[in-house]
Image (cartoon, rainbow, N blue to C red):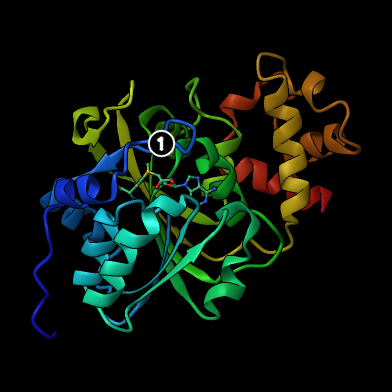
Amino acid sequence: MADLPPLPPLREVIAKHGLSASKALGQNFLFDEQLLGRIAAIPGDLDDKSVLEIGPGPGGLTRALLRAGARVTAIEMDERCLPALSELEAAFPGQLKVIHGDAMKIDHGELIGGPFAVVANLPYNVGTALFTNWLGGEAWPPQWSSLTLMFQQEVAKRIVSQPGGSAYGRLAVLAQWRSTAKLAMKVHRSAFTPPPKVMSAIVHVTPKDMPDGVSAKVLEQITAAAFGQRRKMLRQSLKSVRGALDALAELGIDETRRAETLQVDEFVQLARKLS
Ligand SMILES: C[S@@+](CC[C@H](N)C(=O)[O-])C[C@H]1O[C@@H](n2cnc3c(N)ncnc32)[C@H](O)[C@@H]1O
């Protein structure tokens, strides 16, 4: 790898470009370059790999990704951040492309046009929606090779949770039925400027083989019904899903159980019967 260009401290970048954090845009910045380096290392070797970053802001995580040799496409909604990001583009020629826009309205696969890893300190207001978009749909394997994403710790726990607890729900099933989801790192609220009210954690997700004969849409329909009335027995919560009660009987799943006791694989078996 070529010598890395020297960069000014992130606090100087913020001051120079007048980047006061906007609450509406979910802006909580990270300045600790060691921490940012550790986050950029979670997906593994990024040298010459395509990375999609959502919400680069002043570019703290972006510079860590660039230093790791990644070719970064970054989507940022706040135009105030663009001059700071242009400086990074100049410091790492040909390695960074910045798109000014709303990540919710852009087709990421089309934008990058090949396999890519997603690494992002997500804006909390759109984090879960982006996550479910990446994980949803019938097409599998996805174009992304991994998702390394910062969430509020409570959301991260819901993503990696196992049956039996109150954190287990639709998000866990969606994240785990054809992916592996791990809690990669906890991040203290004091690491951010300004500090958010709650703790954060980074989740690392990699796709695995899609189970045969299962429609993602049907699986989503079943989990929506089952967890929509999570305190009820399955015979009540799944009543509205055509064929579900017969499928439970055929699979030998006790209809007096509640959604939160079903293993991800039991949801998959149920969806296969109904797909
Ligand atoms: C939590 S901050 C992270 C900033 C920076 N990556 C860091 O780690 O310090 C979230 C960033 O996402 C941007 N953002 C918010 N909503 C967005 C959207 N819909 N599309 C793209 N960027 C968005 C914000 O402007 C902000 O820069």
Residue at the spot 8% in from the left edge and 69% down from the top edge: 6
Q: Is residue 6 left or right of residue 36?
A: left
In this orientation, which residue lies closer to the viewer: 184 or 197?
197
Residue at the spot 46% in from the left edge and 54% down from the top edge: 79
Q: Is residue 156 left or right of residue 40?
A: right
Residue at the spot 43% in from the left edge and 39% down from the top edge: 160
In this orientation, which residue lies closer to the viewer: 201 or 91?
91
Q: In the figure, residue 270 lies in which quadrant?
A: top right
In this orientation, which residue lies closer to the viewer: 203 or 94?
94
Rendering coords of residue 253 (x, y %): 70, 32
Q: Secondary structure at mark 1?
A: helix
The verdict on label 1 being within 8 Å of ligand 1 is no
Q: Judge whether 7 appears above or below 93 on screen.
A: above
Instruction: Answer yes or no: is residue 228 visible.
Output: yes
Rendering coords of residue 274 (x, y %): 83, 48
In this orientation, which residue lies closer to the viewer: 97 or 109?
97
Instruction: Answer yes or no: is residue 252 visible.
Output: no
Residue at the spot 12% in from the left edge and 59% down from the top edge: 8
Rendering coords of residue 78 (x, y %): 46, 49
- The 10 Å Cα crowd at callout 1, few under 14, some 14 to 19, many 20 or more, is many
| Quadrant of the drawing holding the C terminus | bottom right
Q: Is residue 105 left or right of residue 84?
A: right
| Quadrant of the drawing holding the N terminus | bottom left
Rendering coords of residue 132 (x, y %): 59, 47
Q: Residue furthest right?
A: 242
Count the marks: 1
Q: Which kind of residue does numbered mark 1 sit on?
A: Ala
Which residue, given by chain and number where applicable, does mark 1 sit on? 156
Q: Judge whether 189 appears above or below 45 on screen.
A: above
Q: Residue furthest top?
A: 231
